[in-house]
Image: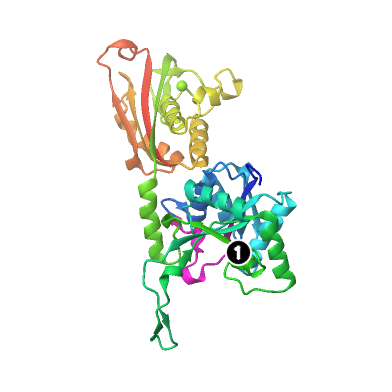
Amino acid sequence: MNASPNVAALIVAAGRGRRFGGEVPKQYRKIGGRTVLAEAIRHLGAVEAIETFVTVIHAEDGEPYAEAAIQSGVAGSRLASVVGGETRQDSVRAGLERLSQAGFPDDGIVLIHDAARPFAGEAVVMRAILAGMTAGAALPVLPVADTLATLDADGHLLANPDRAAMRAVQTPQAFRFSLIRDAHRRALAERRTDFTDDAGLAAAYGHPVASFAGDPSLFKITLEADLGRAEAHLSGTRETRAGIGYDVHAFTTGDHVVLGGVAVPHTQSLLGHSDADPVLHALTDALLGTIGDGDIGSHFPPSDPQWRGASSDRFLIHARDLVAAAGGRIVNVDCTIICEAPKIGPHRAAMQVRIGEILGLPTAKVGVKATTSEKLGFTGRREGIAVMAIASVVF
Ligand code: MG
């Protein structure tokens, strides 16, 4: 047995979700600002043991898949997609063949997972990998709490099966790669389609399938009401981060300053990097702070002549995109401008609108405040403008 096998996740997201109704397939419905598929990739992506992902998508879903891949925050180098087939079985086989073409080793472990179960935690995924390594084929199960019944065609009780031997089956199901790939190929050759899922297919070809403890968080989003449950689950696990920023620019000769992306007439200008907008610079640092990714100077070195006189929008846009790529959603930003002059009040609303446009936030979530420093210090002596900023981002 290989001590640390190659591990791939095959995420099945090609369904049209007809049971759900509506225009949008359920894997592209949103929960907490991201699509169900993005959450599925994000959760599995947090498990370092999984090196590579193949998501099986519908031919029409290239665009929403690409968006979900970005929203997931998982490095693009770990992600691949392939177009699925008519049935779930066809789609899984397409994903397995994609892994085969990419040279995935026969003794690697593949986790086959439904996108409609977005919350795969590390503990259950590690149980899956271990069970797959040990048994070659394994599925997660939960005990059945409710009494079970079989009914006749009229809906009348026929019998109560003994629930002691019954289990509810989830995904991810774990397999040695060659075992499940070859079983799927054989099913194709024999035109067999009578399998409930991949574990059922493996069992039908004589492979013993072990079980391991599933996880209630792996519930499947099937009905509209499940989206509400998913929202509630997410809000209980979501992490909120804050980042701060601070910037100062000195006055020089000129006739306006740029603050919050807005040109404000003044008897002086600000000296420095780009258009020297300390509001957008401080906000850029605040956003970078939420992902621990350096500061504006490390992304846009002041020594680089290409930023001379540049509009500072691009710095904030860059930070916004890095936050999104890390899976973050900006909740709000706030800043305080410290200067004796110019007066900020008449320009506050324009700054809120401009910053909100860049960050995709309504003005109620963009704070712009101003204060003097009571003629104390460098801002009090009218030598320059200082700005403090904060950003709040949920992940
Ligand atoms: Mg600056």
| Quadrant in the rendering for residue 93 | bottom right
The magenta segment is 10-30
Which residue is painted at 40% across and 60% down in the image? 227
Q: Estimate the x, y position of residue 348 in percent, counting from the top left.
A: 33, 33
From the viewer's perspective, is residue 133 above or below residue 304? Answer: below
Question: Is 114 on the left or on the right of 339, as rendered?
Answer: right
From the viewer's perspective, is residue 380 above or below residue 337? Answer: above
Queried whether the magenta region covers residue 375, the answer comes back as: no
Whether residue 190 is visible to the viewer of this picture, yes or no, is: yes
Which residue is painted at 71% across and 58% down in the image? 97
Queried whether the magenta region covers residue 18, the answer comes back as: yes
Q: Nearer the viewer, residue 274 or 222?
A: 222
Question: Is 48 on the left or on the right of 158, as rendered?
Answer: right
Q: Amino acid at mark 1?
A: Asp
Residue bearing the label numbered 1: 198
Q: Residues within 10 Å of mark 1 (few under 14, many from 20)?
A: many
